[in-house]
Image: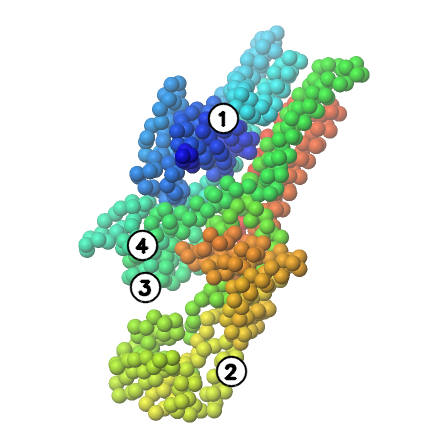
Amino acid sequence: MADPVIDTKFRVDGMDCAACAQKIDAATRRVSGVSDVEVSVTAGVMKVTHAAQTDLDEIVRRVDSVGYRAAPLAKAEVPAATPSASGGHDHDHDHDHDHDHGGDQRDKLEGLHGHDHGRADGPWWMARKAQLTLLCGAAIAAAFVLVRFFPDYHQWIFTAAMLVGLIPIARRAFMGAINGAPFTIETLMTVAAVGAVFIGASEEAAVVVILFLVGELLEGIATGRARASIKALADLVPKMALVEANGATTEVPAERLRVNSIILVRPGDRIAADGVIVGGESAVDEAPVTGESMPKRKAEGDEVYAGTINAEGTLRVRVTAAAADNTIARIVKLVEEAQESKAPTERFIERFSRYYTPGVMIVAALIAIVPPLVAGQSWSEWVYKGLAVLLIGCPCALVISTPAAIAAALSAGARRGLLMKGGAVLESLGKVDQVALDKTGTLTEGRPKVTDVIGVTRSEDDVLRLAAALEIGSSHPLATAILAKAAEKGIAIEAALAGGAVGGKGVTGRVGEDQLFLGSPRAAAEKFKLPAELEARIVALNDEGKTVSVLLVNRDVAGAIAMRDEPRDDARAGIAALKRIGAEVVMLTGDNRRTASAIAAELGLEPRAELLPEDKQKIVGELRQQGKVVAKVGDGINDAPALAAADVGIAMGGGTDVALETADAAVLHGRVIDIANMIVLSRATTSNIWQNIALSLGLKGFFLVTTVMGVTGLWPAILADTGATVLVTANAMRLLAWRGIER
């Protein structure tokens, strides 16, 4: 029988660009039993697929040997929650390991719980890279002072100062080469610095080394910002919660909350878990999770999300999701998985860079050798130029241009409740020019609301009071709508006596001396003749897609109530935003033609009604055949065939019920305008990626020409590399500030 294959995730500290990931990948694949490796620079995580008997300690040593720190995050035979998201795990399986990286202490994995590794999350100056940079900087500063007193030893003093920084770089280059990654920036740096010493340019070599270290340090700080944006999302959930049990309130860690526990949330507190309010009423500030600027009124029966802020009254909340499954934990997990999946542009650039670096080394060698051999030019001058070209040849800025932008965009989207399954989906969204939307639950709220109350022989409030009396205790959507309207108007309701249902026609009951019947206009007309004026009004309301119920009291027609599944508050603005960005919009619904036409006319879009799921799928296919790039937006369950048929399937959900399995992306908080926001974010990201590519190649091209012409030397060459990388990363980080279209 084949050995079981296990996935283990490692936290890796010290990564800041794609070249780091390639070295770690190459080194890890050489460990016996490892079958696959996935490294995410932005998440700072490596996933290794390996045989059960694989030595995890050997993986840690291999990663450590190429200059990074690794430690297992979780035993992934069990699907674990993202550590940063949930703050806690199943203790039978989930061990975070700390490692002593000194000498032979690496031989054992220490099973210590719950500690982070290395110093990636501490102050920047505590990182190993920062300390090496400071030490090298101090050595070079000392060298500049010493040569004033000992000018005859100029070459030796600067060489010694340079070696402080170069020895760790050269060691990483050597370890990379023996672990299957010979063409790294460290290799280029080492060759260039050693070559410079041989042609008598040790002072320049020393400055090049310190500039390289400073550039790497800045890269690390910039990459850390992308990670911090996701960590900040995870940190929204409070660490502790107040739990009510047996009449007492106790404080417990939020990660230990169980489903159906009752938690107490005081005014000003963050809510510790996803749940449903079972007591109290308050305004809840959802801005940290949804980006919604205005607090929402929440009362008994309403859903609340972990990380949101209770602004006013005390709330009692029944927990509906454990820490590992709450909205924020799921957002963080999805974003981290998305950041690990590569976009088409990123895959192309990685393939390109595999040939680019060896190609540059050959060009640099030719520049150094051909002019002196063929034209009798000065060896020192052309070797110097060759070394400068070598430094320009590092592909770091080019390789990081796409993943940095995509990581920042996925983080920015997640903060607004826009989830996309990776870079490929993010790139595809920008090309969308046709959006097909489901009606119920996507364009509309998915539940009816009372829109009109008509008094005939009774007042409007009386009609509502008596209708509500019949509906107390019913969970029918129309009953719920009537009770909600009565509560909104503050009408006191007395439950009807002798209540009952008349099969398929309506409900009956008695309030005081009054015998009541609430039912369809047809059922009411069978009992009494309806006034002509009311009949005309009912026809007009039906044409608007509304359902009408008529109330009879004793032998009189008391009035009528009209209800409809109303469009979402921002549906009109969302459709208008889609049209503004050049997307055509169509509504696909299984509802009747009259209701569909009424809603579509109100929102300004084309309706296609009375469709079965396979009809929706067929229409999406036809739109694609016309050359359209189609996004299908639905609730993700009964729309599964159409979602799968579209170029991009977007699930419209309300927090915990998002069916992301069928969709490529999700609008977590049910705002129609967020569909346009997804497309706008994608276009901003694509634009940012091309800016980054132009910036990195433009700087390299410029310095390549000026170096060969003899205008610039080694210092500007290293700035063309590390400077470009820092500029590209900083440009990508601008996406973190993306706010989207407001209404």
Residue at the location (29% across, 46% down)?
256
Mark 3 is surrounded, within 10 Å at the Cα level, by few (under 14), some (14 to 19) or many (20 or more) other residues, namely some
Cβ–Cβ under 8 Å for marks 2 and 1? no
Q: Specify the amino acid type for callout 1.
A: Arg
Q: How many labels, in total?
A: 4
Distance, label 2 to label 3, CA atoms, is 35 Å
2 vs 1, front mark: 1
Horizontal side of 273 relative to 229 (left or right) equals left
* Mark 2, residue position: 540
**Amino acid bearing label 4:** Val
Marks 4 and 2 sit apart, C-alpha to C-alpha, by 45 Å
Circle 2: element type: helix
Q: Which three-letter amino acid code belongs to the residue tagged 2? A: Ala
Instruction: Say above or below: 157 vs 323.
Output: above
**SS assignment at label 4:** strand
Left-right relation of 645 to 81: right
Label 2 to label 1, Cα distance in Å? 75 Å
Q: Position of residue 708 (x, y in %)?
A: 73, 25
Residue that carries the numbered disc 1 in the rendered image? 30
- Seen in the image, is 579 located left or right of residue 612? right
The residue singled out by tag 4 in the image is 319
**In this view of the protein, which residue sits in the foreground, 5 or 627?**
5
Query: If you read the primary sequence from the N terminus, does the residue marked by circle 2 or circle 3 appear first?
Result: 3
* Residue 488 on image: x %, y %: 37, 72
- Residue at the outermost top position: 152
Mark 2 neighbour density, 10 Å: few (under 14) some (14–19) many (20 or more): few
The residue at the point 27 percent across, 50 percent down is 242
Q: Nearer the viewer, mark 2 or mark 3?
A: 2
Residue type beneath disc 3: Glu
Q: Which residue corresponds to mark 3?
A: 300
Compared with 54, 369 (above or below) is above
